[in-house]
Amino acid sequence: MDREVLDFVVKKTHELMDAASCSSEAKAAAQVWLDAVGTDREAAETAKYIAELEADIVTVDGLISFAQSEAGASVFGADNAKNIAAHAREIKAAGAKYCDCPACAAVEAILEKKELM
């Protein structure tokens, strides 16, 4: 992997891990990948990491559906869930494909580089 791409992905991986909205699975995969960088396990762990990120990123439509559900209301609180759904509809109208929380934003940035990883 090119050094510039590696540095970018490492930076975004740390942002992902620091995000309150990062799932435990993504955080674990991120740490395993970071630990594998520069070793003979790097290629295999990169493939696993990308697969985990692709599974975890939330589409804007998924965010809207979740925020409007009972589960979303219990996670976010009823009023906040309505605000999140409205925000998601706004970013969708502006062309967003994915949730724009810190975790999803980091994942989206990493996945934009996946062909170079």
Image (cartoon, rainbow, N blue to C red):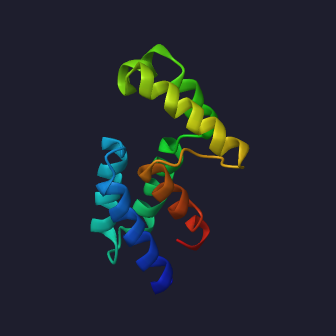
In the rendered structure, the answer to whether residue 33 lies left or right of residue 1 reads left
Comparing 117 with 110, the one in front is 110
- What is the quadrant of residue 6 in the picture? bottom left
Residue 44, given in percent of the width and then of the height, sits at 43, 62
Q: In this view, does 66 lie above or below 56?
A: above
Comparing 76 with 55, the one in front is 76
In the rendered structure, the answer to whether residue 104 lies left or right of residue 19 reads right
The residue positioned farthest toward the top in the image shown? 70
Which residue is drawn at the image coordinates 57% and 68% (left, top)? 113
- What is the quadrant of residue 38 in the picture? bottom left
In the rendered structure, the answer to whether residue 84 lies left or right of residue 27 reads right
Q: In this view, does 116 lie above or below 4?
A: above
**How many callouts does the rendering have?**
0
Which residue is drawn at the image coordinates 51% and 63% (left, top)? 110
Q: In this view, does 15 lie above or below 61?
A: below
Residue 60, given in percent of the width and then of the height, sits at 61, 39
- What is the quadrant of residue 76 in the picture? top left
Q: Is residue 115 above or below residue 105?
A: below
Residue 22, given in percent of the width and then of the height, sits at 36, 46
Q: Is residue 1 visible?
A: no
Which residue is drawn at the image coordinates 36% and 44% (left, top)? 21
Q: Can residue 98 be seen in this view?
A: yes
Which residue is drawn at the image coordinates 32% and 75% (left, top)? 39
Residue 69, given in percent of the width and then of the height, sits at 51, 17
